[in-house]
């Protein structure tokens, strides 16, 4: 199969001009050009790991602190989900669960899977991997849903002594985790999946 | 290679990212958990009011922590263990030995509502640190379990001044206000029992601490200070809080030094005690005279001069010791000869002496104000030193409840008192010594008489000669009344007789003047009272001495003066005269009034008449002059209900009054009235007479007995001559009983219900009245109402065996688009009821008395078309 590597070419990812492999600058748009994203694997792994780390406080610490008549009620993501499930709003619970727990975990799982796939020879499920990659790229922007919910609640529910909502430390952790996941996804070069080990850029 | 190197450098940087992430996340988790606070356990008696996650630990309004857990101590079930999570930043100051934790709950202590904010937020725990110096606090030992306190620690009030207050009673409560000029300057913090006293600890706020002096005096704020006497009622209410909760107030002399803390004071009972002299005077008496430690006072010339501190009775000595304290200014004026006496209240409405019954007995004293030193002990006298005057002796056979100290009245003015009551064994009489006060001594002279006055004799009279309205006092005690006929008479006598009663006295007076007593007998109560006058030719001839109820008669005893007594003879008749004679009729009202006295009291008149009853054994008291003439006779009339008849209802014959209703008596099954009929009309009451009621009636027929509407119902008599005299009748409710002994036809109609038929409801034939309904009764099986209809003789041939009767009360109503058509026999039948007789054209034999018909409820249009020709004498043929 002909690839840019076999042909010693490098595609400019900005204007999609095909340069020679040694041209570090795109002949057409003068952007930086390389055959593969530089350090794609390491960066992706590093960001994915960081994201994973932030998911721990994000799920452990309270996301939202609701103060009703002077009574604080700090709830973590899962507590919130359970609250909705137990109080008859299963729909909202499921949405929050999907957006806040399932999706980030799924995304990170996929990233790690993809990273593993790049290192495995004679792979068979590349098409599936590719599909998963497109999915996580697509849902990346929806991952902030929970943060939006919290942000909305915080700005709207400010009734002084009656009821106030403030964000908990988990919100920041969660936001960081989501952002880091997106960055990890951005840094992942899907072409790595298709490269045969020995022809790889490294 | 260069590229490789660069890659390696970059790689190194790349791995910093997860490292930083790890640090950041780790820090976040650490910070969160380290901010969680420190737990401590406070032990309270009860966990009531605490809520997990809600109850706060507060210091000066700031939240320091929250209750995290509540549980009962598993080793001691009396305790509730409250786990409080204290915020990390303040934990170092809070968890120190010596700090106090108070549970603050909404408390409505009457001095105010405390912890009102907790009503909404629930109870909270307030921190009372042992010191206000943070450094000092931090030096304290770390401690994480505490025992909660229930009262604000005294050390918390380290700014004001404390005082101890000793009181014999523990009626004040913790939190009660300490007032100065009705302004709250502090409060009672603590209450404890110390030996036999109650020791209060109170705190005066810092800014007011200068108000408290060493010689300050504390006294209770009485809830409501009611001063009531005959001059009026004075109500003094301090602040609302102290009104309910009580409180203490103090006053401070200006020249005293400011009090040090924890100075001990004695709690005085009231403000009155404030200026009492320290010296206690003991009064020795035989009796405590119902004096009361709390209420009785000592007055000097009407001014409150002190109070009683103790009343003690010594059994051995049979003596009462009354310890009193006088106010400074009064203590100064007493000397060794000061005369103390007790003034006992007498329930009189005259005031002045023995004044307010409200305050009870009181003590008073007389002093000459010489400079001699006051004694510690005085004798308490029973009488005032100026109870001097004319001494009078009475002899009595009975004294009732007369007591020493009792009053003597002249025209209801107290003029003296009973000094001594003593039994004279020799005469078997009671000797009474009276003191007539000097200024009244001229009232007693040789024409005076004394009698025992009691409440039940008391009465009003317009006659000046008779005294007294029994005063309220006489209800409780007898007293002696004085009568003097001639104030100018000489005064030589010193011994008088005490008459048992006013009656006795009067009797005596009449007898001594040569009068005579007569007994009159009346069948009913009379309007006059004892003392009411008896007149002869408008001269006052005497008065009623006594009225005795004897079985069903009233015996009236009267006295007549000597001159008039001789006028009474066989021809004499006594009768009552009431104030007004009112004759009312439609033509007008005529009022004849007598003299003023008889208007108010009623009186008896006697007169000699031409005619008299030879057989008379006693004097009868007639109701009025007419009765005295004795020209009426009685007729009994029995009725089932009273029919609004009253005494005085008229008895009419053809509208002319022949008598009136005299009396109403209740019988077992009805009412018996007695009619009083003029003898002239005796003939009217015979076996043929019917007595019926004239009631006001308004119907479409017209108005009947309009007079009855105004004057109430009356009774009418119809009569025909020939019967024998009869004086007992049964009242017919309605005049309507003409079928009685009247010729005609009586038939019985079976109706399923009575409808609006009444006695007298008409029976029509071709809309002409031919008879009426005579009576109703329920058939034996109660299935029908049997209506007896009477048909007049001249129409009786119209009723045939096959005749139909229908109830014309019912009316038909046709409602159509064009209107409502009402069908009724006559308008009157619609309202009053009525029966219509229909006889078919093929009529049969004539009906006879007692024939039974069915009363149809509705008419058939066919019937209305019947028009038989019936001849009056045809009956004989068909029969």
Image (cartoon, coloured by chain):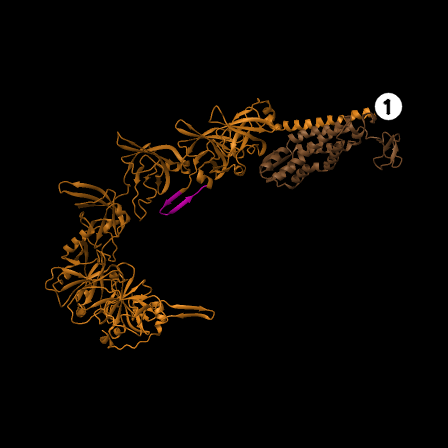
Residue A98 falls in image quadrant: top right
Please check the rendered image and state whether residue B811 is part of the magenta-colored stretch, yes or no.
no
Q: Which residue is mark 1?
A: B1
Image coordinates of residue B760 in percent, x first then y, are 29, 68
Image coordinates of residue B13 in percent, x first then y, are 78, 26
User: In the image, what residue occupies the spot 71% across and 26% down?
Assistant: B23
User: In the image, what residue occupies the spot 13% across and 62% down?
Assistant: B568
Q: From which residue to which does the magenta span run? A: B226-238
Which chain is the one coloured orange? B
- Chain designation of label 1: B
Image coordinates of residue B654 in percent, x first then y, are 24, 72
| Closest to the observer, B198 or B811 | B811
Residue B523 falls in image quadrant: bottom left
Image coordinates of residue B263 in percent, x first then y, are 47, 29
Chain A rendering hue: brown
Residue A178 falls in image quadrant: top right
User: In the image, what residue occupies the spot 28% across and 59% down?
Assistant: B782
């Amino acid at each position: 199969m002909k690839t840019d590597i076999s042909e010693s070419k490098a595609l400019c990812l900005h204007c999609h001009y095909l340069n020679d492999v040694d041209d570090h600058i795109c002949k057409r748009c003068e952007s930086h050009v390389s055959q593969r994203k530089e350090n794609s694997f390491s960066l992706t792994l590093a960001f994915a790991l960081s994201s994973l780390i932030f998911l721990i406080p994000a799920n452990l610490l309270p996301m939202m602190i609701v103060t009703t008549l002077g009574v604080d009620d700090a709830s973590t993501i899962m507590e919130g989900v359970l609250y909705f499930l137990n109080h008859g709003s299963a729909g909202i619970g499921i949405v929050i669960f999907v957006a806040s727990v399932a999706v980030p975990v799924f995304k990170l799982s996929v990233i790690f899977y993809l990273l593993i796939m790049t290192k495995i020879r004679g792979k068979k499920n590349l098409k599936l991997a590719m599909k998963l990659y497109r999915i996580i790229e697509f849902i990346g922007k929806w991952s902030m849903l929970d943060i939006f919910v919290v942000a909305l609640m915080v700005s709207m529910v400010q009734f002084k002594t009656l009821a106030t909502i403030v964000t908990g430390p988990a919100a920041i952790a969660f936001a960081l985790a989501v952002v880091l996941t997106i960055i990890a996804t951005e840094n992942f070069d899907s072409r790595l999946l298709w490269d045969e080990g020995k022809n790889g850029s490294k | 290679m260069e590229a490789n190197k660069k890659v390696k450098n970059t790689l190194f940087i790349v791995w910093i990212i997860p490292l930083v992430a790890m640090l950041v996340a780790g820090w976040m988790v650490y910070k969160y958990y380290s901010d969680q606070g420190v737990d401590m356990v406070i032990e309270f008696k009860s966990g009531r009011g605490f809520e997990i996650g809600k109850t706060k630990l507060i210091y000066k309004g700031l939240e320091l922590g929250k209750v995290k857990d509540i549980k009962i101590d598993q080793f001691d079930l009396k305790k509730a263990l409250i786990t409080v999570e204290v915020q990390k930043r303040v934990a170092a100051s809070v968890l120190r030995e010596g700090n106090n934790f108070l549970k603050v709950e909404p408390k409505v202590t009457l001095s105010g509502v405390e912890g009102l904010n907790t009503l909404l937020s629930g109870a909270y725990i307030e921190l009372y640190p042992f010191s206000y110096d943070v450094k000092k606090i931090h030096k304290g030992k770390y401690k994480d379990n505490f025992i909660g306190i229930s009262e604000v620690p005294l050390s918390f009030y380290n700014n004001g001044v404390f005082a101890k207050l000793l009181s014999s009673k523990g009626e004040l409560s913790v939190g009660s206000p300490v007032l100065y000029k009705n302004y709250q300057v502090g409060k009672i913090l603590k209450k404890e029992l110390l030996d036999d006293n109650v020791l209060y600890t109170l705190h005066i706020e810092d800014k007011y601490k200068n108000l408290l002096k060493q010689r300050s005096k504390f006294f209770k704020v009485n809830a409501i200070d009611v001063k009531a006497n005959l001059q009026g009622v004075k109500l003094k209410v301090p602040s609302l809080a102290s009104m309910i909760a009580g409180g203490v107030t103090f006053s401070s002399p200006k020249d005293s030094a400011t009090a040090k803390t924890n100075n001990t004071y004695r709690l005085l009972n009231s403000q009155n005690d404030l200026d009492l002299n320290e010296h206690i005077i003991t009064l020795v008496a035989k009796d405590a005279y119902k004096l009361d430690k709390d209420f009785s006072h000592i007055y000097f010339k009407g001014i409150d001069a002190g109070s009683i501190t103790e009343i003690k009775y010594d059994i051995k000595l049979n003596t009462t010791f009354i310890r009193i304290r006088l106010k400074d200014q009064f203590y100064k004026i007493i000397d060794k000869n000061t005369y103390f006496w007790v003034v006992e209240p007498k329930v009189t409405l005259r005031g002045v002496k023995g004044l307010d019954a409200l305050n009870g007995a009181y003590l008073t004293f007389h002093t000459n104000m010489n400079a001699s030193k006051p004694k510690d002990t005085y004798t308490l006298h029973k009488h005032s030193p100026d109870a001097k005057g004319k001494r009078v002796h009475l002899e009595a056979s009975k004294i009732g409840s007369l007591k020493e100290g009792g009053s003597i009245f002249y025209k209801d003015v107290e003029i003296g008192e009973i000094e001594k009551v003593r039994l004279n064994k020799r005469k078997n009489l009671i000797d009474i010594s009276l003191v007539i006060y000097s200024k009244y001594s001229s009232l007693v002279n040789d024409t005076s008489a004394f009698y025992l006055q009691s409440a039940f004799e008391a009465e009003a009279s317009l006659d000046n000669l008779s005294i007294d309205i029994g005063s309220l006092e006489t209800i409780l005690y007898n007293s002696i009344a004085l009568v003097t006929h001639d104030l100018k008479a000489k005064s030589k006598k010193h011994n008088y007789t005490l008459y048992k009663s006013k009656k006795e006295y009067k009797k005596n007076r009449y007898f001594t003047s040569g009068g005579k007593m007569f007994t009159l007998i009346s069948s009913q109560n009379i309007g006059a009272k004892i003392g009411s006058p008896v007149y002869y030719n408008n001269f006052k001839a005497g008065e009623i001495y006594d009225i005795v109820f004897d079985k069903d008669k009233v015996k009236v005893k009267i006295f007549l003066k000597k001159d008039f007594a001789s006028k009474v003879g066989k021809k004499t008749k006594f009768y009552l005269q009431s104030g007004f004679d009112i004759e009312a009729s439609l033509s007008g009202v005529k009022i004849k009034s007598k003299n003023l006295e008889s208007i108010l009291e009623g009186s008896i008149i006697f007169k000699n008449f031409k005619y008299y009853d030879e057989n008379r054994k006693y004097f009868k008291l007639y109701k009025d002059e007419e009765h005295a003439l004795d020209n009426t006779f009685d007729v009994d009339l029995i009725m089932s209900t009273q029919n609004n008849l009253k005494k005085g209802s008229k008895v009419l014959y053809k509208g002319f009054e022949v008598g009136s209703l005299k009396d109403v008596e209740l019988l077992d099954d009805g009412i018996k009235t007695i009619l009083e009929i003029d003898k002239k009309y005796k003939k009217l009451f015979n076996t043929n007479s019917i007595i019926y009621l004239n009631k006001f009636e308004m119907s479409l027929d017209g108005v009947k007995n309009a007079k009855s509407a105004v004057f109430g119902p009356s009774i009418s008599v119809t009569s025909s001559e020939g019967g024998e005299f009869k004086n007992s009748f049964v009242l017919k409710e309605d005049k309507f009983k003409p079928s009685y002994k009247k010729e005609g036809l009586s038939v019985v109609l079976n109706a399923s219900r009575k409808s609006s038929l009444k006695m007298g409801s008409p029976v029509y034939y071709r809309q002409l009245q031919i008879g009426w309904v005579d009576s109703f009764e329920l058939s034996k099986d109660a299935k029908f109402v049997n209506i007896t209809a009477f048909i007049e003789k001249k129409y009786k041939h119209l009723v045939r065996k096959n005749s139909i009767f229908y109830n014309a009360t019912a009316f038909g109503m046709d409602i159509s688009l064009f209107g409502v058509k009402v069908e009724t026999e006559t308008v009157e039948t619609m309202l009053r009821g009525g029966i219509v007789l229909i006889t078919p054209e093929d009529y049969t034999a004539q009906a006879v008395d007692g024939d039974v018909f069915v009363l149809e409820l509705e008419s058939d249009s066919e019937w209305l078309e019947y028009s038989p020709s019936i001849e009056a004498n045809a009956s004989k043929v068909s029969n």
